[in-house]
Image (tube, grey):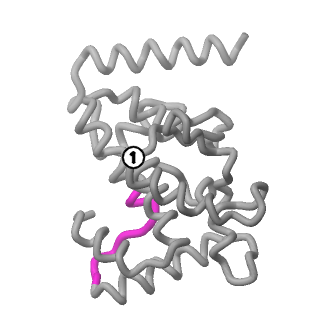
Amino acid sequence: MPQLDFEATYRKAGPLLQIALLLAREAGLRLKAIREFRLDNIDFENSQVYGRTKAYGTYNVPMTKRLEAKLLWACASLPDVGQGILQQFNRGQKPVCGTNIQQKLAAAKRAAGITRKWGMHDLRRTGARNLYRVTGNILKVQRFLGHTSPAHSWWYLGLEANDLSQAEIEQCSSAQLNEEKENAA
């Protein structure tokens, strides 16, 4: 997804959608995790966000300066610390649903004149690709995405096993074996 499309959409978005966009793109969170994101998912002292993955593992992701600034701003006005952060920006402070976010995204894209098709999950993939481009480490991407299988992360990035070095494949395989042993114990 082009950077210009994201920035144009971000500028047209309200605070609820801006936070959701950044959590998807820069922290790699799934839509469900974004909807349920709370103050207790943030460690401002260490500039990290954390929580549980779909597979009941945990994620721990460093925050970008942009995400941290937006979350500080949002948390400063949070009326109830037990409430979802996005909920405070929703009409009547009702819980946020995925459809609500998708509708807000479609409206912001229209307002920005964006016609390319992309959604929240594409932002998650963009974050993962950026991490892989910077680190070259498929295991970091796997942990970032909360995937249990390296093969899923390869597919997610649009990679095939032959795109990876032999060392990366062996590293992923041994990590998978160690995880399976831990889970069996």
Image: magenta residue range? 114-123
* Residue 154 percent across, percent down from the top left: 35, 37
In the rendered view of the protein, which quadrant contains the N terminus?
bottom left
Kind of residue at badge 1: Thr
* Residue 158 percent across, percent down from the top left: 29, 46
Q: Residue at x 67, y 51 (%)?
A: 39
Q: Which residue is mark 1?
A: 64
Q: Residue at x 73, y 70 (%)?
A: 95
Q: Residue at x 44, y 54 (%)?
A: 67
From the viewer's perspective, is 125 left or right of 27?
left
Q: Residue at x 27, y 40 (%)?
A: 159
Is disc 1 placed on a helix, strand or loop? loop
In the rendered view of the protein, which quadrant contains the C terminus?
top right
* Residue 17 percent across, percent down from the top left: 50, 72
- Asked which quadrant contains residue 10, the reply is bottom left
From the viewer's perspective, is 4 left or right of 121?
left
- On whether residue 118 falls in the magenta region, the answer is yes
- On whether residue 119 falls in the magenta region, the answer is yes
Question: Total marks drawn?
Answer: 1
